[in-house]
Image (cartoon, helix red, strand yellow):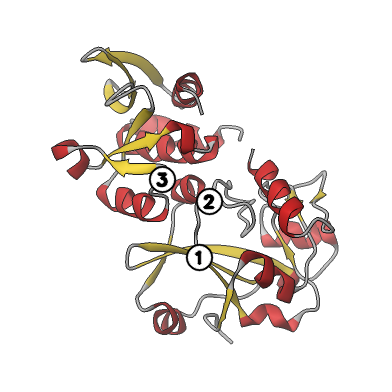
C-alpha cells in the first residue's frame, strides 16, 4: 500500500514524525485544511509535472499556483501536469494522497519557496485521509529536495 | 507483484475479461487487448500505453518499465518487470492502457471505482 511506503520511508528518514490518519477525507487542499483546522495555504500540495519528457515533483503551499514562466526558467522547458494514472504509475500514490515521501520511482523533488512562509506545513502521506506535520526545511531535507521559486506571487 | 496479482488488477477494471493469444494470457476491454502476461517471459506483464506515456514511465522508472521489443514497443507496448513493481505502479499502468480502449460508457465507471 502507498501509505505503507510512506511509513517505511519515515521510519528510515524521520522516525519521530507521525502520520495523522483522519476519519474524513484530506484529498483536496480545502478538505485537508478543514480536517486539520488550518488555513488552506498551510497544506503542502505535491504537483506532478512533466518537463521535456522527464517527471518531477514540486511541493508548494496549498494556495500557490504554478507560474509557467518561472517553471520554464527553473526546469528548462514547459511544464505540464501528469494525469492521475501516470501519477499513480510513477509515484505509487493515488490522487488525493500524492506525497513526496515513499515514492515508487526515484523522482526529483523540488520545494517551492512559498512553503517558507510557514513554520510547519501539512503534506499528504500516501492516502486520501493521511497526512503529517513537518517543517518546510525538514521536508526538503528528508526528500533531498532542491528549493525553487516556480509559483505565482 | 505476482502474475496473479497483475491478473487481479487487470480484471478489476470495468468490462475487463481474460483471453489468450500465442499461448499466453491477455486482458481485453471491448474485445481489444490492453494488457498481457507471460510474454516475453513469466517475469513480465505488458500494458499498451501511448508512446508519450511510455516515454515518461520508462524514463522515470527504468527498472520497472521498458519498451517491448520491435514494432510493438514503438507503438507503446510497455513491459512491466513484476518483481520490481509496486502494485500501485501496475494499477496505474493498467488504468492508462484500459482508458485507451474502453468504450465510452465504461470510462465513467473507472473513476467511480473504490480505491
Q: Earlier in the sequence, mark 2 or mark 1?
A: 2
The residue wearing badge 1 is A108
Q: CA distance from mark 2 to mark 3?
A: 14 Å
**Circle 1 crowding by C-alpha within 10 Å: few under 14, some 14–19, many from 20:** some
Identify which residue is drawn at 55% across, 84% down: A149
Q: Position of residue A144 (x, y in %)?
A: 60, 69
Give coordinates of residue A145: x percent, y percent: 59, 71
Badge 3: how crowded within 10 Å, few (<14), some, or many (20+)?
some
Image point (36%, 15%), residue name: B18
> In the picture provided, is A27 more to the left or to the right than A85?
right
Between A32 and B40, the residue placed more toward the observer is: B40
x, y percentage for residue A105? 50, 52
Helix, strand or loop at disc 3? loop
Residue depicted at x 63% and y 52%: A102
Q: Which mark is residue A9?
A: none
Q: Which residue is mark 3?
A: B63
What is the C-alpha distance between the residues marked 1 and 3? 16 Å
Q: Does mark 1 fall on the same chain as mark 2?
A: yes
The local crowd at label 2, few if under 14, some if 14 to 19, many if 20 or more residues have their Cα within 10 Å, is: many
Q: Is residue A70 above or below residue A3?
A: below
Can the viewer see residue A62 in this picture?
no
Q: How many marks?
A: 3
- Distance from disc 2 to disc 1, alpha carbons, whole Å, reads 11 Å
Q: Residue B63: x and y, percent?
A: 41, 45
The extreme bottom residue here reads A153
What secondary structure is found at the residue carrying circle 2?
helix
Question: Circle 2 marks a residue in which chain?
Answer: A
Q: Where is mark 2, residue-wise?
A: A91
The chain holding disc 3 is: B
Q: Nearer the viewer, mark 2 or mark 1?
A: 1
Instruction: Residue at 74% x, 50% y: name it.
Output: A130
Amino acid at each position: 500500500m502507498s501509505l505503507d511506503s510512506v511509513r517505511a520511508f519515515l521510519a528510515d528518514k524521520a522516525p519521530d514524525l507521525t502520520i495523522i490518519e483522519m476519519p474524513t477525507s484530506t484529498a483536496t487542499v480545502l478538505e485537508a485544511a478543514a480536517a486539520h483546522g488550518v488555513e488552506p495555504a498551510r497544506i503542502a500540495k505535491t504537483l506532478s509535472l512533466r518537463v521535456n519528457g522527464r517527471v518531477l515533483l514540486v511541493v508548494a503551499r496549498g494556495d500557490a499556483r504554478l507560474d509557467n514562466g518561472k517553471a520554464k526558467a527553473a526546469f528548462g522547458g514547459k511544464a505540464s501536469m501528469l494525469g492521475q494514472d501516470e501519477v499513480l504509475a510513477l509515484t505509487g500514490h493515488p490522487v488525493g494522497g500524492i506525497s513526496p515521501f515513499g515514492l515508487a520511482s526515484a523522482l526529483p523533488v523540488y520545494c517551492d519557496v512559498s512553503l517558507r512562509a510557514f513554520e510547519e506545513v501539512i503534506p499528504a502521506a500516501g492516502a486520501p485521509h493521511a497526512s503529517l506535520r513537518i517543517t518546510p526545511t525538514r521536508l526538503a531535507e528528508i526528500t533531498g529536495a532542491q528549493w525553487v521559486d516556480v509559483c505565482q506571487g | 507483484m505476482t502474475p496473479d496479482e497483475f491478473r487481479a488488477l487487470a480484471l478489476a477494471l470495468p468490462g475487463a475479461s481474460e483471453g489468450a493469444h500465442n499461448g499466453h494470457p491477455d486482458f481485453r476491454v471491448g474485445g481489444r487487448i490492453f494488457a498481457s502476461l507471460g510474454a516475453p517471459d513469466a517475469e513480465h506483464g505488458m500494458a499498451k500505453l501511448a508512446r508519450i506515456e511510455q516515454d515518461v514511465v520508462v524514463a522515470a522508472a527504468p527498472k520497472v518499465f521498458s519498451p517491448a521489443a520491435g514494432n510493438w514497443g514503438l507503438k507503446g507496448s510497455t513491459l512491466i518487470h513484476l518483481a520490481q513493481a509496486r502494485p500501485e505502479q501496475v494499477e496505474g499502468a493498467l488504468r492508462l492502457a484500459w482508458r485507451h480502449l474502453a468504450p465510452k460508457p465504461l470510462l465513467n465507471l473507472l473513476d467511480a471505482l473504490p480505491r
